[in-house]
Amino acid sequence: MSKTSKKATALSRKARIEEMRRAERARERRNRIITITLSAVVVVGLAGWGAYAINSANKKEEQKASGHGRRCRWKELCQPCAYCGGG
């Protein structure tokens, strides 16, 4: 083998190694972005579910405190609520 073919082989090998390194970095970057995105979606989902649960519990407490169920039968005695609007 001549000196130039050895250099060409070495350069080709270095180029392949560098390309493999670039591909590995791109894969790691892609995985990191996917992980961060999924984590953010989970956090937002949990926060939204928590807010919904608290809001639902507060509405139930308001209903209990108003002293009546879903429909008011005593509209003249009814206090304003979320269901009937106060009579």
Image: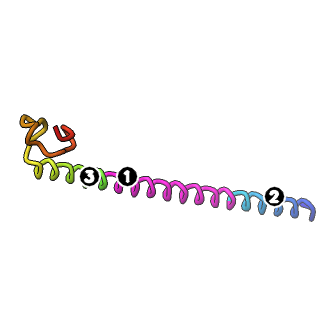
Give the residue type at disc 1: Gly
Return the residue at label 2.
12
Note whether 51 is above or below 81 in the view shown. Answer: below
The residue nearer to you, when weighing 26 against 61, is: 61
Q: Real-space Cα distance between discs 1 and 2?
A: 49 Å
Q: Residues within 10 Å of mark 1 (few under 14, many from 20)?
A: few
Note whether 27 is above or below 75 in the view shown. Answer: below
| Quarter of the image that includes the C terminus | top left
The range drawn in magenta is 21-49
> Of discs 3 and 1, which sits in the foreground?
3
Return the residue at label 1.
45
Disc 2 and disc 3 in contact, CB within 8 angstroms: no
Q: Residues within 10 Å of mark 3 (few under 14, many from 20)?
A: few
Position of residue 36 in the picture relative to residue 12 (left or right): left
Can you give x and y, in whole percent of width and height, for residue 49 in the image? 31, 51
Return the residue at label 3.
55
